[in-house]
Amino acid sequence: MKNTIVVCGHGPGISHAVARRFGEEGLAVALIARNKERVTAAAAALKAAGIEAQAFACDLGDAAATKAAVKAARAALGPIQIVHYNAYTSGGGDLLTAKPEELNTVFNVSVQGLIAATQEALPDLKSSKGALLVTGGGFAFYDPNVDGMAVQYGAMGLAIGKAAQHKAVGMLHLKLKPEGVYVGEVVVLGSVKGTAFDSGHATIEPSAVAEKFWQMYQAKSEMTANFS
């Protein structure tokens, strides 16, 4: 039985490119996302390319459901060597009108799901000296210009979620390093081709970001890398 990469928050951009890149290296691929039809189709596409893959429908804002999905992925495909966390939500775009439940959802998807997936996979990550790889975003940075963009684009909730996630990644990097588990983050500073943020002017190739994740995984040194 192969070792597995669990891709949490699968979509058509970076996460699919990561699934394909790591699958080509011989890992089985578990795709977790909320939309059952889309994630099932994505797994079928990977299978057609010769990669062992299965789909698992799950709301990554639900910690219990996230743990159950990761557990099911392990049972179906094999021990978990890598967790790739790519989930996000754009809820709570205007903090002055956002409902409390919107902001709760932002935190749950950005941070709680990340922690739940890590906790469930942790025994395997430790035994395999594996990795937690996270897709970060430039909205996380503490900078007046970045804050202004978040306000302008109605992405205030996303910015808060990514900032909290960035902090969590830093602490997990330090916490798990003595256990031999690598934690790394690629912070994407721009729009990715083929995603919901691509209005026709995106410049970032998903495959290039996936390659950066692969390089970081091989080196297992830097905690965070900016990508533009």
Image (spheres, rainbow, N blue to C red):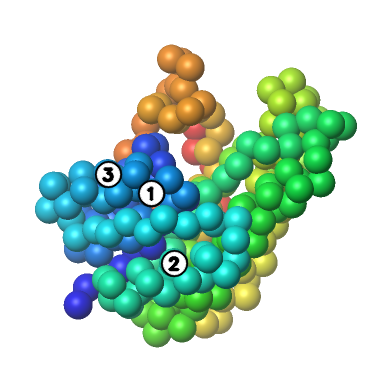
Task: Identify the residue position indicated by label 2 in the image.
Answer: 69
Query: What amino acid type should be assigned to the residue bearing mark 3?
Result: Ala
Q: Is residue 174 above or below residue 227?
A: below
- Give the structural element (helix, strand or loop) at label 3: helix
Among the two numbered marks 2 and 3 on one chain, the one whose residue lies closer to the N terminus? 3
x then y, percent, for residue 67: 51, 71
Q: Taking 203 as reference, is 43 left or right?
A: left
Quarter of the figure with the N terminus: bottom left
Please state which of residues 79 and 73 is positioned toward the viewer in this rendering.
73
Task: Identify the residue position indicated by label 3 in the image.
Answer: 41
- Other residues around mark 2 within 10 Å, as few (<14) / some (14–19) / many (≥20): many
Among the two numbered marks 1 and 3 on one chain, the one whose residue lies closer to the N terminus? 1
- Give the structural element (helix, strand or loop) at label 1: helix
Task: Identify the residue position indicated by label 1 in the image.
Answer: 36
User: Looking at the image, which residue is at 71% across and 26% down?
Assistant: 154
Q: Taking 98 as reference, is 199 left or right?
A: left
Q: Is residue 119 above or below residue 161?
A: below
Where, by quadrant of the figure, is residue 27 drawn? bottom left
Query: What amino acid type should be assigned to the residue bearing mark 2?
Result: Ala
Instruction: Give me the C-alpha separation between circle 1 and circle 3.
Output: 9 Å
Among the two numbered marks 1 and 2 on one chain, the one whose residue lies closer to the N terminus? 1
